[in-house]
Amino acid sequence: MSKLVIVGTVAFDAIETPFGKTDKILGGAATFIGLAASQFNIDASAISIVGGDFPQDYLDLLAQRNINISGIEIVKEGKTFFWSGRYHNDMNSRDTLATELNVLADFNPVVPTAYRNAEIVMLGNLHPMVQSSVLDQMEVKPKLVILDTMNFWMDTALDDLHNVIKRVDVITINDEEARQLTGEYSLVVAARKIHEMGPKYVVIKKGEHGALLFHHDNVFYAPALPLEEVFDPTGAGDTFAGGFAGYIAQTGDISFENMKKAIIYGSTLASFCVEKFGTERMIDLQHHEIQKRLKQFKTLTQFEIELT
Amino acid sequence: MSKLVIVGTVAFDAIETPFGKTDKILGGAATFIGLAASQFNIDASAISIVGGDFPQDYLDLLAQRNINISGIEIVKEGKTFFWSGRYHNDMNSRDTLATELNVLADFNPVVPTAYRNAEIVMLGNLHPMVQSSVLDQMEVKPKLVILDTMNFWMDTALDDLHNVIKRVDVITINDEEARQLTGEYSLVVAARKIHEMGPKYVVIKKGEHGALLFHHDNVFYAPALPLEEVFDPTGAGDTFAGGFAGYIAQTGDISFENMKKAIIYGSTLASFCVEKFGTERMIDLQHHEIQKRLKQFKTLTQFEIELT
């Protein structure tokens, strides 16, 4: 089985949407990435940090999904990273109500020895120096390194971000962030500029409008499944990245053609994530449901046209 | 050859974009619809009205593209409808600088006798009573009636709009307008509500994010081609509708499967329209260029996935 290293937050989230609100629930980039990746036949390890307040039940839940948690450091006297946000009516924008870094402020990730030869590395959204540190610890050059990031690091740690971007093969980034990173409005031009920063593959996430995969002059466009209701978008981007990384790890195929499929898997898993609060939907998600939705994706996008 | 009736404005536009500005140039919904439809092997007739100030050259240009112009009334002592607008930097929003209805204020469309048995009717964006009047004149029930409209008529003539919507098979409408018409944010729910108003097929245009085709529980999603630059979006929606209607008319096939292809043709033609000011790109557009771009659309969206 291919090894997949995942680094990211494991956190508490408190979420308000037009449909309701939650107390502190399980969240974090590594959690969503891990849950999505656990749908594939791979050996995944999550690298993160939590406080003494983090329930053993949550750790057990990840372990039961065959996510190796030996790289999740527990700081007994510390508190777990906490994020709280409120979504607007359109569900496309949100206000951050609270960000308490807590144990994350001094996070020095340690990749478990057994995973230092992993084929695939998924660097979830975190300080770019933490992401770099994970790459430094790899003893064998990974077949594929995927990086997710966000505008916060462009505002606060741009040089560090450029340093890690240089070292990765695939970047996943949302449309507004791609524009911010490059100063270009056209996503085609933005993707080309990001290519020039290092990544051979650029995935631009457009939320309800789907995702674009760029590789030199090749482009692939995966729509998001049109949904009746988006209940809670939290974690959708991470779930997308986890599905992408998990499928690549399972197949061991890093061709453009296979990345298209990985994007479709990512979009499919993300379409489930938004149906309930937090990780709820991802936890009870069954294989046959995924297969059914993949079929919907095919119907949604495939057409026959005769070219002359 | 199938007959296609097109009703809409034939107009002067003056456009400002971040790339430049134009004096009064050829524009109007029927113009863009007609130029797109003229790429197909059909017998199209444009129903519209212009003033004595409208250059014979422009009428000749349409006639040379095999668009029957006997239904374009010329009011010698009147002035042609004029619209002027300025696009913002994102090219997705614009300010209307001037709207001079002129001869359009008293437009009573007359469908030429030879076209009152047309198989396909494309009601371009105009007052809904004008659109209804065209339907009233059809002597044989058309195989398919397609309607395009905009928020302006929702604000000023909602009852008339509902009356014509009831009578059509396909509606093309943009995402914000679908939300305004139904009061629903989710496009899936909005499309269902529009179905209930009459149209069996609902096409929601999302600009740079592509278009959705809804028919009961079936959904098809066509992306817009990611472009380096959108030079001028004017007429893109009409061009899309014209490509859709033209392809349906040429094939005579109103099945959902064929409508998917019609949507792809519409998107393909619209992707050319935005490359230059006004109608400029549509006028010199060649068959082989369209075929090449259709191929790009296939590459952009098609994937192979094994379902288990």
Image: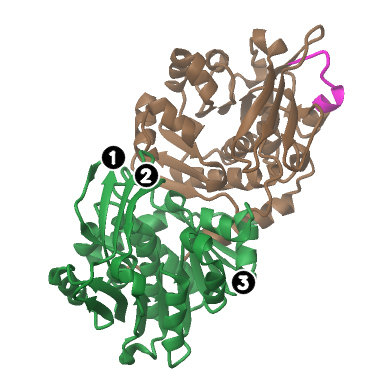
Chain colours: A brown, B green
Disc 3 marks a residue whose amino acid type is Met
Which stretch is magenta?
A50-59
**What residue lies at 51% left-to-right and 24% top-to-bottom?**
A151
> Along the horizontal axis of the image, is A184 left or right of B204?
left
Alpha carbon separation for disc pair 2 and 1: 8 Å
Judging from the image, mark 1 belongs to the subunit labelled B
Precedes in sequence: disc 2 or disc 1: 1
Q: Secondary structure at mark 1?
A: loop
Provide the chain ID for the residue under circle 3: B
Tag of residue A218: none
Tell me if residue A121 comes above or below residue B302 in the rendering: above
The first of marks 1 and 3 along the sequence is 1
Q: Position of residue A113 (x, y in %)?
A: 65, 15
Q: Quadrant of residue B118?
A: bottom left
Q: Is residue A163 above or below residue A93?
A: above
- The amino acid beneath tag 1 is Pro
Q: Are marks 2 and 1 in contact (CB under 8 Å)?
A: yes
Instruction: In the rendered structure, find residue B91 and report the number of the disc placed on it.
Output: 2
Q: Secondary structure at mark 3?
A: helix
Is residue A232 visible in the rendered image? The answer is: yes
Q: Which residue is mark 3?
A: B197
Give the amino acid at mark 2: Met
